Image (cartoon, rainbow, N blue to C red):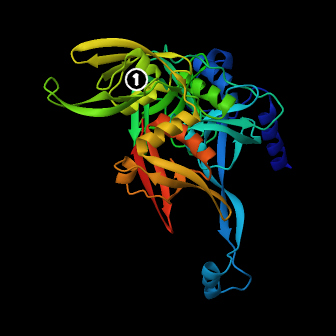
Amino acid sequence: MRAGAALCGALALLLLPGVVPAQSRSVLPRAEPRPAAERRNPVVVAVERSRVAVVNVSAEELVRVRVPAPGADMGQMLFEEFFGKPRFRSGYAVTSLGSGVVVSPEGHVLTNAHVVERGARFRVQLLDGRELPARMLGTDPATDLAVLQVETKERLPFLPAGRSDDLMIGETVIAIGNPFGLAHTVTTGVVSALHRKVGEPGRQLFDMVQTDASINPGNSGGPLVNIQGQLIGVNTAILGDRSAGIGFAIPIDRAYRVAEDLIRHGEVREGFTGVAVRDEPVKSDRIGGDRVLVQVRGVDAGSPAAGAGVRKGDVIESVGDAPVESAAEYRFRVRDVPLGGTVRLGLLRGKERLQVSVRAVELSPERAEQQLLQRTGLSLGEEKVRGGTVVVVRSVRRGSPAAGSGLQAGDWIREVNSLEIGSLAEWRKAAVRARRSGQLVLLVQRGFAAERVSFDVD
């Protein structure tokens, strides 16, 4: 009874309001907590506004898996491989994970082209955890941008765009994305630099926004946001294999121009000026070494550039207000000129400096094809084969670049710049893209052998 009374007394002591046993008191001082409303600084407000529009993007590739016959051994499988009809099962495998941002209430998602380039089926995950299917509207590998359409009838929260032409070095920015699969991760930093060039094998981007907001694998395609919660860039690249505190974003002004074309037309409609350029290394005593000039190596007759007075041999020093240091940079900046717009070129002709305005007009598939065939020396046709049609080389002009590359009449053209073609109509569409990019890469088949042949065609 005495033990029971003592226990009940201890319980009663614990239950008395305001009474804390001595052994449970904290020995460490604690600050009086500030109300959450007082801690909602501008970064918190911007994150609350923007993260609801950020999605995780998964791209699934259609793959075929070999299915052996029931009970078949290795010998039977090899016999079936070479002399029979191997059986396959088709399925989907996730090949890419990245980020994206909803940019309209209708569910348009802006992301990177390299996130979705191998995908055949796409899904996006919203902040509330729901996964929704999406379809591809278009990609633009030149700027590493793509647009998906979320397949839903509901209106989705979206992130309004700000401006990237007035960004200030040092201003606060926020990156939101899916690094290493950690959904809706938020990092902060500043605009570290503007107009950066980012290059790696097979990919070169110009005029990028540099930031020290932490960007890691999986952040690709996610938004870079200003302190007002507005979209000012699309996170795209990091320095090296890991971020090292240096990341790069596509300015939103360029991204929106590309996205508008992808939504309306499924591709970027570039203006054509008629200028062919090349890199021309020269000795420069002032810098004590070689310098690369962007030289005009050709002007198409009847083109806007010809009408503006651009001549073969001119050196292009600037496009608009931006200096250019390579032919690749020139092509990149001219792509920013909207169809029907004008671009101001700064030219050096001998010792004279000139400014000319050149209009960007639409390049028709027929004109692009004519220019490519003229530059390469190819004559193409279409032939029916078992299972469809192929594009075939009819003739090769003597002394032409195509002849120098070893192409012959009867060769089949299977791909143009890694895009499979099977008809002259598909060839003409690919010709427009190749003419704009300045590079034509053909996959040529002769009998059972195939090889790639490349031409400069700008």
Which secondary structure, mark 1?
strand
Query: Is residue 113 rendered to the left or right of residue 347?
Result: right
Q: Is residue 364 above or below residue 374?
A: above
Residue 70 position, x and y percent, is 74, 82
Point 44% across, 26% down: residue:
274
Residue 321 is at least partly visible in this image? no
Q: Residues within 10 Å of mark 1 (few under 14, many from 20)?
A: some
The image quadrant that residue 389 belongs to is: bottom right
Q: How many marks?
A: 1
17 or 93, which lies in front? Answer: 93
Residue 181 position, x and y percent, is 60, 45
Query: Is residue 68 rendered to the left or right of residue 289?
Result: right
21 or 451, which lies in front? Answer: 451
Q: Identify residue type, mark 1.
A: Ala
1 or 80, which lies in front? Answer: 80
Q: Quadrant of the C terminus?
A: top left
The image quadrant that residue 65 belongs to is: bottom right
Q: Is residue 295 above or below residue 118?
A: above
Point 47% across, 37% down: residue:
371
Q: Is residue 358 above or below residue 327?
A: above
Q: Is residue 166 above or below residue 248?
A: above
Residue 98 is at least partly visible in this image? yes
Residue annotated with mark 1: 193
Residue 303 position, x and y percent, is 46, 23
Residue 45 position, x and y percent, is 64, 19
Query: Is residue 226 rendered to the left or right of residue 396?
Result: right
